[in-house]
Amino acid sequence: MNFLLISLITQFTRYSLAFTITEVEEPLTSIKIHANEHRTLNLDDARDAILLSYNRSRGCEITPLQLQFETQEFRIIQPYDFTEKDFESDTILNFRQFVSMVHIKDGMLAITSDSVAYLLKFNYNTVFEHDFEEKGQKFARILWKADLQTIAPTLVAKNELPQLLFAPSSNLAFLLFSDTAQLFSMEQMESQTTSLDVYQVTDWRKRGYRGLTKEMDGLVFSAVGRDGLDVYKIVQKDLRFIKNLKLKDFGLNSTIEIVDFAIVKHGIADGYYSMFLLDRECGLLLIDVHRDQYVNFGLRSWINYQSGGISVDTRNGRNVFMAYQSMNHHYVLEYNVDLDNGNSFPIRKKKVDNRIIDLDATDDFVIVQGVNQHLILFSNGYDYVMNNHQDQVFKHLGLRDFAFFNQSYKLEDMDDITKEYQYDDFFFGITAQSAFLTRFQIQPIKMKCFYHQADVGQTFTYILQYNTTVDGVSDLVVRHTQMMNIEIIKTYFYEAEYYLLYSVCFLLGSVLLMGLGYVGYWFYSNQRQHQILVEYIEKTAREKGIKQINGSTMQKGDETSVFQQQNKSILP
């Protein structure tokens, strides 16, 4: 195995970035394949791969990373939930339907258009069982249901869709509108009480637009469009407004329109965060956030100046995805970002044919949410090294909102979910009248081969190249190069049939041997019993013969004595 280190310097207008490619020459591999046989080779650690043929053969090909989905859905809102008054209304919002949801600990909280709240808890034994049914309500149970119309306005009255926010640091849930906000205790809701205490947020600022609102360690950030970014602090059972952030706070004179943001913790120290702030006109900015007695913001870098921003998201802070619209076309950009020095560079630019509504990222991929058709893009820090990804489409009709499972939450009756469930490998959400849960599993890159009978006797040569990365090392790519010889051989049986015949013969042979063994044992047992019976009969016969002889001898002795007595009496 040979190693070759290659250092590449990628030049940008503002700075240069370096990464290292380690070339690994793998030994020659020879594979024999039967004609009309499907053969698959898994490349478990590969992030991308290409296959080159010396013979221009198309018998083998590479299939990219894929997600395998399993979805279970059950209907919560039933036809009998509607009244005659609902059908008399002209607005569709007056019909009970789910409009918003949020991930809370080991479940989710969802609210309908007429302000009815549902609290669902996951059944983890069902979620992680091997046989996962597509229909049914086994993945979750409705723990609590409450009508909030008396304490919260209906959507018809507000004429807007609310947001649900969960703050794990205080175990509070928030119902947010553009001008009002209410909060209530999840602990009280989980106790299935007959009444629920709802508190009005007294310091909630009215805004004409309200985008993403997210809580992080007791701080609440809310994107409010042309009003910038609002920052609140949770104080007992209330929110206190502490800051409004605009571009002029960074010395920029541009007008502001914050449409989305993503925030992650920076390092292991408490109170340090990195925020990716997306402005509709000014593009994507990397902001440092530091919390001590006050909340301070600092501009680390201006990642791009692309206008038309729609959404931004990241899970690890390194692979950052941004969606934007330009000339009625939608695009997704992926950046590799170094949070320590603020450097970044684009990995790829992907044109999306359908409308983009939102982005939701994991460590491995991002879901580009559309209307009914959603796109799966795998994150890869080095697409420009070897770009061979194919897009995967995920369809879920009527999807309103969803969230990925967050394993950092403390779960009911479980101190640490990571001990039993290692991966956050499912997401869940709502449609108009149902809740659903989707499990996913990443299928590795595969090399698939299939040849016909006409190819028997030939050998085809391929060069396989695939990239792997090293955990914790962001500037290293290991590129493997391997030559492969595929020999097509002729057999009387296909391999599967051969194994089947072999198994059947082995089974029949085993049954025959067991039968012969049983017959032999039965014959031996009968012979043994016959021998014992013969010996017993002979022994009995001998014993009877001895007794007869002894009886005859005694009788003769008595006659002799009498004869002697008689003779003795005759003598003179």
Image: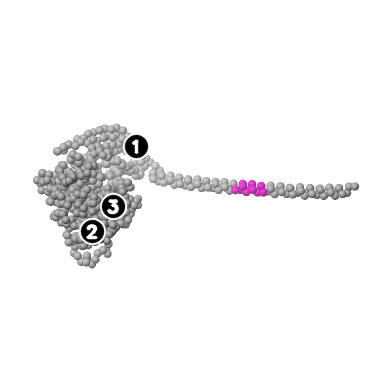
Given residues 110 and 190, the one toward you in this image is: 190
Task: Check residue 130 for magenta coloring.
Answer: no
> Residue 34's spot in the image, x, y percent?
36, 42
Q: Mark yes or no: residue 327 visible.
A: no
**207 to the left or right of 522:** left
Of the two numbered discs 3 and 2 in the rendering, the one whose residue sits closer to the viewer:
2
For the residue marked with disc 1, what is the amino acid? Ser
Other-residue count near label 2 (Cα within 10 Å), few / some / many at <14 / 14–19 / ≥20: few
By secondary structure, the bulk of the magenta-drawn segment is best described as helix
For the residue marked with disc 3, what is the amino acid? Asp
For the residue marked with disc 2, what is the amino acid? Asp
For the N terminus, the quadrant is: top left
Q: Residue at x 27, y 52 (%)?
A: 105
Residue at which label 2 appears? 197
Residues shaded magenta? 529-540
Task: Check residue 535 for magenta coloring.
Answer: yes
Residue at which label 3 appears? 106
**Disc nearer the start of the sequence (3/1):** 1
Given residues 556 and 8, the one toward you in this image is: 556
Disc 2 is placed on an element classified as: loop
| CB under 8 Å between discs 3 and 2 | no
Q: Mark yes or no: residue 130 visible.
A: yes
> Residue 487's spot in the image, x, y percent?
35, 38
Disc 3 is placed on an element classified as: loop
**Disc nearer the start of the sequence (1/2):** 1
